[in-house]
Image (cartoon, rainbow, N blue to C red):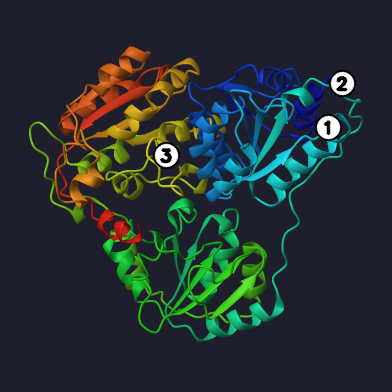
Amino acid sequence: MLVAELTGRVLARLGAGPVFGVVGSGNFHVTNALRAAGVEFYATRHEAGAATAADAYARTSGRVAIVSTHQGCGLTNAMTGIGEAAKSRTPLLVLTADTPESDPLNNFRIDQDALVRSVGALSHRVRSPGTALEDTVHAYRTALHERRTVVLNLPLDVQAMDAPEPGEIEPIGPAPLVEPDEPGLAALTGLLRNAERPVFIAGRGARGAASEISALAEACGALLATSAVANGLFHENPWSLGISGGFASPLAAELITGADLIVGWGCALNRWTTKQGKLIGPGARLAQVDIEKLGEQRPIDAGVLGDCALTAAALLSRVEKRDGYRSPELRERIAARARWSTADFTDESTGTRIDPRTLSAELDRILPAERVVAVDSGNFMGYPSAYLSVPDELGFCFTQAFQSIGLGLATALGAALAQPGRLPVAALGDGGFHMAVADLETAVRLRLPLVVVVYHDAAYGAEVHHFPGDHATVTFPPTDAAAIGRGFGCAGVTVRTPADLAGVREWLAGPRETPLVIDAKITDDGGSWWLAEAFHGH
């Protein structure tokens, strides 16, 4: 057995996977070793797509997915996706070949360790045949238990060396839950007992804890909201305000600003979630529950270092039932207006272009409710985020920590494979669509029933609307995205008016054996409502 084969076998026995990648000579053997051991492999057309699809799969499945890249250029191609995963603390394992130390003039040679560390990922290495088992297990355990993106470098000379049989592989379960600290519990209990208008905002760290947090909110009379990445967590709760931050509806923003206590559950309460702090009302107290980095984004009045579900359960026994922020009248207002709807705008569609709000609201109505929505970055992104509802926190995949355009299509690929019972929807701008278009072929090859919605304004809309001056560098001739989709083997529909969505209904009624590209020619929105705030954070 060679080291490359041992690495693949060990990861398969640990339960890692599936694998996404572009195979070259450097990662050929380890990828085939994974496949031979039963790990599913998905070939993408670009390494950035592989890294992002694996990131999305991990986020929506709970498994440690794997990325496989060639040394040097294969790794550099994947770095934007790796950077996004690292910033999002996605448990992800990147297997990348590396050049031998004995070949310093190799064309592929770069300082891979420094490159990986520069984007916030951890760089590990298979050092020798004698340590290969230990190195591989350690990399996997670190990704799983520390919620980190780990790059495991596999030098070509070490890969080709003989390795001992791995023997019995001890299974690695989830990391032990962090019990909440008593001083933090006491401080937060005091705040909850005195709060008259509490709001709970849950983030990525609260996924899986919806029932415990909801029960505590019921006892305290708290309203519920989420950060963008946790969208859907409280989908069926009548006291849910939806997303907090730039995507918040007018009513959600009003009620969050009116809170006298805001508690972040697995949520950093960063500039995006708090709308540059504008959603924190005068005199509001802040508290945070998380397993690390309390108070990193802004000062807090109380913090509990602990698991969100355990903390909520512990607090439930310490607080007395009270109405708090809740009332029958407010419940009716939330039911009517907490989510963005057609009542919040005047339709500005023309005979040749559709209002992106109208488009999004209509798609929300006609697409199946069991869906997983992936959103690319750009001026358009607030529309699908605000108007397309999702059934739970696994129904929304938001790869935006790096704010890179071009990741949305691959995000949808990974989410679709992780959630095969749901309709996958990729919401892209035309800039991101053209940047990542090669992986349309991947969706066709995998026969994914993917709906690709292109919010098409023939420009990088963020720059057009928010930066005065000559826009020749950020505007483009119109293209036919539907025809491009058909060229890859997709179905294609051009939408200029709501009536044109009949083609979408026809595709939904059919076998859905190929992806659908919706080329939506959208009206000029003059700059989206959320983006002006976002640019204050650049």
x and y, in percent, of residue 27 in the image: 66, 22
Distance of label 1 from label 3 (alpha carbons): 43 Å
Q: Could you say whether the residue bearing mark 3 is in a helix, strand or loop?
A: strand
Q: Could you say whether the residue bearing mark 2 is in a helix, strand or loop?
A: loop
The residue at 80%/38% (across/down) is 135
Tags 1 and 3 in contact by the CB under 8 Å rule?
no
User: Quadrant of residue 353 in the image?
Assistant: top left
- Residue 465 lies left or right of residue 518; in this view the side is left
1 or 3: mark nearer the eye: 1
Residue type (three-letter) at the residue carrying disc 1? Ser
Query: Which tag, 1 or 3, sits closer to the chain's start?
Result: 1
Query: Which tag, 2 or 1, sits closer to the chain's start?
Result: 1
Q: Name the residue under label 2.
A: 162
Q: Mark 3 points at which residue?
A: 373
Residue type (three-letter) at the residue carrying disc 2? Asp
x and y, in percent, of residue 183 in the image: 68, 81
Q: Name the residue under label 1.
A: 128
The residue at 82%/40% (across/down) is 171
Distance of label 3 from label 2 (alpha carbons): 45 Å
Residue toward you, 259 or 66: 66
The residue at 42%/81% (across/down) is 284
Query: Which tag, 3 or 2, sits closer to the chain's start?
Result: 2
User: Quadrant of residue 496 in the image?
Assistant: top left
Residue toward you, 535 or 65: 535
Residue type (three-letter) at the residue carrying disc 3? Val
Q: In which quarter of the image is the N terminus?
A: top right
Q: Could you say whether the residue bearing mark 1 is in a helix, strand or loop?
A: loop
Q: Can residue 414 be seen in this view?
A: no
Query: Which residue ends up furthest to the front in the rendered image?
Result: 105
Query: Which residue ends up furthest to the left in the rendered image?
Result: 351
